[in-house]
Image (cartoon, rainbow, N blue to C red):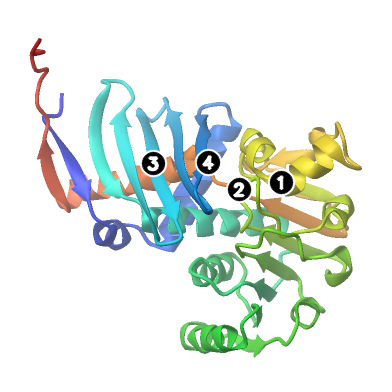
């Protein structure tokens, strides 16, 4: 058995795994999930105070011999996540890693995969609603699977969206447009990504053109919502990262499929992992495709495995000695 584990910092993780690597690793992990070879452990969530929350999210890939948990706290003052990777055969700790960057990688990579498997092959005109800390990685992930020719940006604060647009121009070869409204951003777009911290739905069906692919990324807590019920009603093909996770955390889909027009119709919601395993894609003439992700353990685990295996190979990070059992003192 291994007598030591690895400690990987945020910098170690980003030096070992690129966004493109994360997309590839995540696709393999979701394919295993779709074949029934992996298991998610439902998220444990506690909300407290003025919008603060604590989370724990786990998963296991027995065929690869790995399992792990990500634990994190989020407050208005900050957020911190740590991932623990275990040997699922020997029952031993392999690594602990700071996981804020890992979380950004897997969140963006998941959107990239949703877009890859659901959007039209020639979709290249993107509307981005939101310009916060997840936004840049979201654009990069979509650009990795659909080379973007134009990016339209809207967020509530004019100064922030102008500054974000300038950053986009420095990083991507696409035309970048600062939109004065959501409607101006989405008009004629073939890809729309919504990544905000909105607590009330603001994106309506009338704002979305025919044939568009929508990534709904921001609302991952039951208290939050970005898209109106008429968007869900119109979507001809809906896929999610994890059906059980969405049934617990997505107010937008819970309200529609448990309480609203689509009551009892959860069968309409597809698992992206099953789609990948089966080679399934939406019908070509679908008016609106929609991908919703709320986070799941297998996505973190897929990226963490890659970081760990590369760290061990390249001797990156700090070793942590593992001690045997200690006698109890009574």
- Local SS, label 2: loop
The foreground one among 261 and 328 is 328
User: Along the polypeptide, which appears first: circle 4 or circle 3?
Assistant: 3
Kindly state the secondary structure of the residue where label 1 is placed: helix
Q: Kindly identify the residue that appears in the image at 61 percent across and 65 percent down.
A: 196
What separation in Å lies between label 1 and label 3 (alpha carbons)? 22 Å
Residue 71: numbered disc:
3
- Write down the residue under mark 1: 251
Q: Residue at x 40, y 46 (%)?
A: 72
Q: CA distance from mark 1 to mark 4?
A: 16 Å
- Above or below: residue 268 compared with residue 117: above
Q: CA distance from mark 4 to mark 3?
A: 12 Å
Q: Residue at x 12, y 43 (%)?
A: 319
Q: Which mark is residue 296?
A: 4
Q: Estimate how packed mark 1 is, as few (under 14), some (14 to 19) or many (20 or more) residues with alpha carbons within 10 Å.
A: many
- 86 left or right of 34 in image: left
Is residue 223 visible to the viewer in this orientation of the structure?
yes
**Callout 4: helix, strand or loop?**
loop
Query: Which quadrant holds the C terminus?
Result: top left
Q: CA distance from mark 3 to mark 2?
A: 16 Å
Q: CA distance from mark 2 to mark 4?
A: 13 Å
Whether the residues at callouts 2 and 4 have beta carbons within 8 Å, the answer is: no
**Residue pushed farthest front?**
49
Count residues near mark 4 (Cα–Cα under 10 Å), then give few for <14, some for 14-19, many for 20+.
many
Q: Position of residue 133 (x, y in %)?
A: 48, 69
Q: Which label lies toward us, 4 or 3?
A: 3
Q: Which residue is mark 2?
A: 221
Task: Tell me what residue is drawn at x 76 percent, y 77 percent.
Answer: 182
Residue 288, picture quadrant: bottom right
Q: Position of residue 86 (x, y in %)?
A: 30, 31
Does label 1 or label 3 sit earlier along the sequence?
3
């Amino acid at each position: 058995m291994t007598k030591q584990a690895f400690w990987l910092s945020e910098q170690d993780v980003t030096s070992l795994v690129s966004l493109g690597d994360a997309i590839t690793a995540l696709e393999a992990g979701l394919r295993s999930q779709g074949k029934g070879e992996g298991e998610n452990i439902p998220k444990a969530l506690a909300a407290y105070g003025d919008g603060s929350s604590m989370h724990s999210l786990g998963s296991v890939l027995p065929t690869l011999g790995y399992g792990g948990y990500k634990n994190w706290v989020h407050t208005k003052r900050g957020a911190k996540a740590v991932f623990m990777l275990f040997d699922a055969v020997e029952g031993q700790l392999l690594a602990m890693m700071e996981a804020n960057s890992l979380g950004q990688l897997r969140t963006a990579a998941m959107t990239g995969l949703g877009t890859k498997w659901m959007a039209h092959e020639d979709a290249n005109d993107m509307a981005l609603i939101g310009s916060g800390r997840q936004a840049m990685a979201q654009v990069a992930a979509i650009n990795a699977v659909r080379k973007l020719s134009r990016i339209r940006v809207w967020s509530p604060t004019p100064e922030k969206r102008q500054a974000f647009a300038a950053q986009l121009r420095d990083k991507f070869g696409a035309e970048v447009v600062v939109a004065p409204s959501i409607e101006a951003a989405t008009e004629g777009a073939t890809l729309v990504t919504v990544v905000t911290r909105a607590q009330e739905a603001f994106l309506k069906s009338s704002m979305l053109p025919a044939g568009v692919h929508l990534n709904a990324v921001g609302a991952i807590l039951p208290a939050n919502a970005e898209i109106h019920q008429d968007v869900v009603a119109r979507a001809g093909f809906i896929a999610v990262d994890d059906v059980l996770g969405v049934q617990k955390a997505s107010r937008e889909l819970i309200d529609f499929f448990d309480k609203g027009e689509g009551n009892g119709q959860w069968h309409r919601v597809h698992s992206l992992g099953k789609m990948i395993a089966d080679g399934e894609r939406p019908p070509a003439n679908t008016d609106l495709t929609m991908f919703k992700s709320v986070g799941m353990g297998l996505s973190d685990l897929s990226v963490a495995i890659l970081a760990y295996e590369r760290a061990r190979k390249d001797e990156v990070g700090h070793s942590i000695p593992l001690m045997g059992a200690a006698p109890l003192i009574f």
